[in-house]
Amino acid sequence: MDLLAAIPQKLLRASRIEYDEFVYSWVGALQTYWTRGEGLVDQVLSAMAGTDPAGLRQLRPDDALQR
């Protein structure tokens, strides 16, 4: 888990696979939780806000809410 939590967001974003922004926020929240970093609540709130159907680019709204 420590190795997964250490993967930089920049590396994840460099992938050829594109995800909606909330996925990166959620990964950041999980990394922050695991490493006991600062700003966990803000990251979780950002991930939740990112599931707004108006802002989704990759997932259908129903799929985003089920993940």
Image (spheres, rainbow, N blue to C red):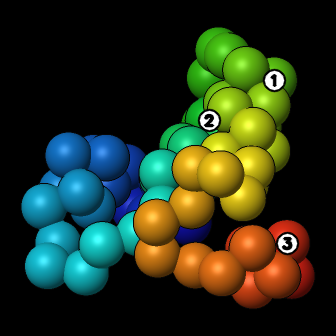
For the residues carrying marks 1 and 2, which lies nearer the camera in this image?
Answer: 1
Disc 1 residue crowd, few under 14, some 14–19, many 20+, Cα 10 Å: few
> Is 31 in front, or is 26?
26
Frontmost of labels 3 and 2 is 3
Sequence-earlier tag: 1 or 2: 2
> Which residue is drawn at the image coordinates 73% and 20% (left, top)?
42
Q: Is residue 8 left or right of residue 32?
A: left
Q: CA distance from mark 1 to mark 2?
A: 10 Å
Q: Which residue reaches farthest front? A: 54
Name the secondary structure under disc 1.
Answer: helix
Spot occupied by residue 5 in the image (x, y as percentages of width and height): 48, 53
Q: Secondary structure at mark 3?
A: helix
According to the picture, the residue beneath numbered tag 2 turns out to be 32
C-beta proximity under 8 Å, tags 1 and 3:
no
Expressed as whole percent of the image width and height from the top left, the position of residue 29 reads 65, 41
Residue annotated with mark 3: 65
- Quarter containing the N terminus: bottom right
- Residue 66 spot, x, y in % from top left: 86, 82
Mark number, residue 41: 1
2 relative to 62, above or below: above
User: Which structural element holds mark 2?
Assistant: helix
